[in-house]
Each structure stands twice: as C-alpha cells, then as structure tokens.
Amino acid sequence: MSEAAHPPPRAHWRDPKRPYWLLGLAVPTLPFQAGGLAAVTGLDVFWWWGPFFAFVLLPLADHLIGDDGRNPPETAYARLDADRYYRWCTYLYLPLQYGALVWSCTRWADGDLGPSRPWA
C-alpha cells in the first residue's frame, strides 16, 4: 500500500472535544439549574427546565450536530487513558447526581414543591 492510504500518525494529537466533556455534567445538575433560574427570576415555570433541556434541547442539538465518526488515532489511546481529566469528568457525575437527588427531595419535603402547588 502507498503512504497516502496510511498517513503517518500525528505525534501530538490533541482532542478537539476535550472542553465539551464538562457538558456531560450539565445533566446531573439540572435540578440545581432549575432551582437557580426559578429563584433568580421568580418564575416557577423554570422548574420545568430539566424536562425541557432533556427532551427538547438535547434532541435538537443532537439533530443539528449530527454524527461524529472521528476517533483518536491508535497512538493517542495510552495518553488519553492516563489523562485524569476524562476520568474526573466521569467520576464527578455520580456525586452530582446524588446531591441533586437529595437537594430535590428536601425541596419537595419542605413543601416548596409538589403536585398541589400550581404555577405561582
């Protein structure tokens, strides 16, 4: 085969999507986001921010962005595996999720939220 069919690997490949890994932490923080938006604006409609984000914004972004078939080169896997940034982005998800669950349950139990409370 010719060299054009198999270009030499780049020694210093950089992940162009590295900053976007933090966006994965937006989902477990949706209750905090909704609570903050409702508190700042005084509009209870922002308690619906989580479902709107999950069922409207994410599918719309997925449709607009489309498929991404680009993967890192084989030579970059060992370095990416050793990078703590990616590991911590995934490690933080679970504590944030549990924190949001506990916070949401305390809000509901305090009587601030509930099915009997209509739009204020």
Image: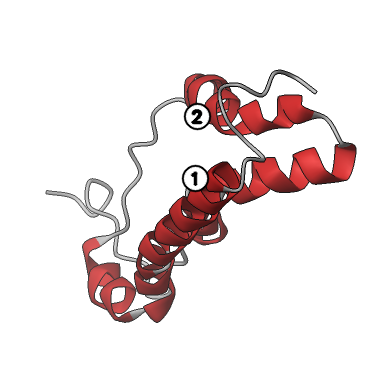
Residue type at the position of mark 2:
Ala
Residue 55 placement (x, y as % from top left): 49, 21
Which residue extends farthest right?
41
Q: Which mark is residue 86?
A: none
Q: Earlier in the sequence, mark 1 or mark 2?
A: 1
Q: Residue at x 76, y 29 (%)?
A: 44
On the rendered structure, is 10 left or right of 112?
Answer: left
Residue 11 placement (x, y as % from top left): 37, 75
On the rendered structure, is 64 left or right of 92?
Answer: right
Question: Which quadrant of the rendered structure holds the C terminus?
Answer: top right
The residue nearer to you, when weighing 54 against 19, is 54
Q: At numbered mark 1, what does the secondary structure look like: helix, strand or loop?
A: loop
The residue nearer to you, when weighing 7 against 110, is 110
The residue nearer to you, when weighing 4 against 29, is 29
* Mark 1 and mark 2 residues within 8 Å of each other at the beta carbon: yes
**To which residue does mark 1 refer?**
27
Q: Residue at x 27, y 74 (%)?
A: 81
Q: At numbered mark 2, what does the secondary structure look like: helix, strand or loop?
A: helix
Q: Residue at x 62, y 35 (%)?
A: 113
**To which residue does mark 2 refer?**
54
